[in-house]
Image (tube, grey):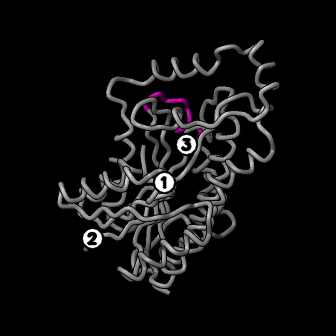
Amino acid sequence: MSNVIVITGASSGFGALTARALASAGDTVYAGMRQTTGRNAPQVEAAEAWSQEHGADLRAIELDVNSQESVDSAIAQVQAEHGRIDVLIHNAGHMVVGPTEAFTPEQLAELYDINVLSTQRVNRAVLPGMRDRGEGLVIWVSSSSVKGGTPPYLAPYFAAKAGMDSLAVSYAGELARWGVETSIVVPGSFTSGTNHFAHAGHPADADVEAAYETRYAGLMDQVAEKLAALAPEGADASLVSDEIARIVALPVGQRPYRVHIDPADDGSEAVSDLADRTRGEFLARVGLGDLLTVEAGAHP
C-alpha cells in the first residue's frame, strides 16, 4: 500500500524535489505551500503538469505553516480524502544572512516562527491521527550547521535550525511508545538546486550592517565561494530528496534515527554521532532505553 505523505515548504528546493521523488515511488504526496493562487500559482501548475506527465499522485495544497488555521484546514482535507497521514516531512524553512547584531529581535522571532514553531503547529494537527493508529513516520529536515562548522553572518538561521533539531530529538522519545518513528535528515551546504541563498532575508538595521562592512567587507561572498569550492562535483540537492525517499521506502522499524548528506563535510556527522550516542547511553541509564527503538505495530 502506498503512503499518504504531507511535506511542508514544497514549492521549491529540497521540498519540491522530495515531493517528486516520493510521488515517483508511487506514494500520494501533498506538497504544502503558501499562496497557491497567488505567488506560488506557477509552482502549483508545474506540480500538476509533472504529475500528469509522470502518472504520479502529486497534489499541491495550500498550507501556510505560520498559520494554525491554514495548517488545520490542510491536514483536515488530507484526512478527509484518505483517512490517514502515514508520513509527515518538516521541510519548511527560511534563511537570513548578515551580521547578527543588525537583525531586530522581531526578525529573529519571525525566523524562529518559520523554522521552529511551524513544526509544532503541524505536529499538533497530524500526530493525533498517527498516535490513534499506532504508526507513522515524522521526518525533520535539519541542518549540518546545528553541530558542524558554522561561518559568521548566518547565526539567526543556525540558531533556529538548532531549535528545530532539539525539538526533533525530544519528540523522537515521546513518540516511540506510540509506534511513530522519527528520522532526522541533516543536509550540509548545497549551493545548487535550492533557493536558500537566493531568497535569504537581510537585516533591518542598515546602519549596523554598514558598520560591520568596515571590518567584514565581502564576507558572505567569500563564504559562498568557499562552500561551493568544498562541494565535490555532482553534489546536487537531489541527493537529499533521494535519501528522504529511501528512508520512507524502508520497512517500519528500520528507518534511521539520523542521516547526514553533507558533501562538504563540515564535521556535523562526527559531532552528531557522539551526541546521539550520549543520548542513547543516558536514556538507558535512567531506564528509558526502550525509547530508542520503535516496534512495528505498536498499537494503542
Q: Is residue 47 left or right of residue 228?
A: left
Res 61 → quadrant: bottom left
Name the amino acid, label 1.
Gly
Question: Residue 91 location in percent, x, y?
Answer: 50, 53
Q: Earlier in the sequence, mark 1 or mark 3?
A: 1
Question: Looking at the image, is mark 2 or mark 1 nearer the viewer?
Answer: 1
Question: Residue 125 location in percent, x, y?
Answer: 56, 74
Name the amino acid, label 3.
Ser
Q: Nearer the viewer, residue 57 or 278?
A: 57
Q: Is residue 108 left or right of residue 79?
A: right
Res 64 → quadrant: bottom right
Q: Nearer the viewer, residue 247 or 26?
A: 26
Residue underneath mark 2: 2
**Image vertical order of residue 266 relative to residue 128, above or below:** above
Q: Residues within 10 Å of mark 2 (few under 14, many from 20)?
A: few
Residue underneath mark 1: 9
**Image vertical order of residue 29 relative to residue 160, above or below:** below
| Boundaries of the magenta span | 263-273
Q: Residue at x 45, y 60 (%)?
A: 32
Q: Is residue 57 magenta?
A: no
In the image, farthest residue toward the bottom: 300
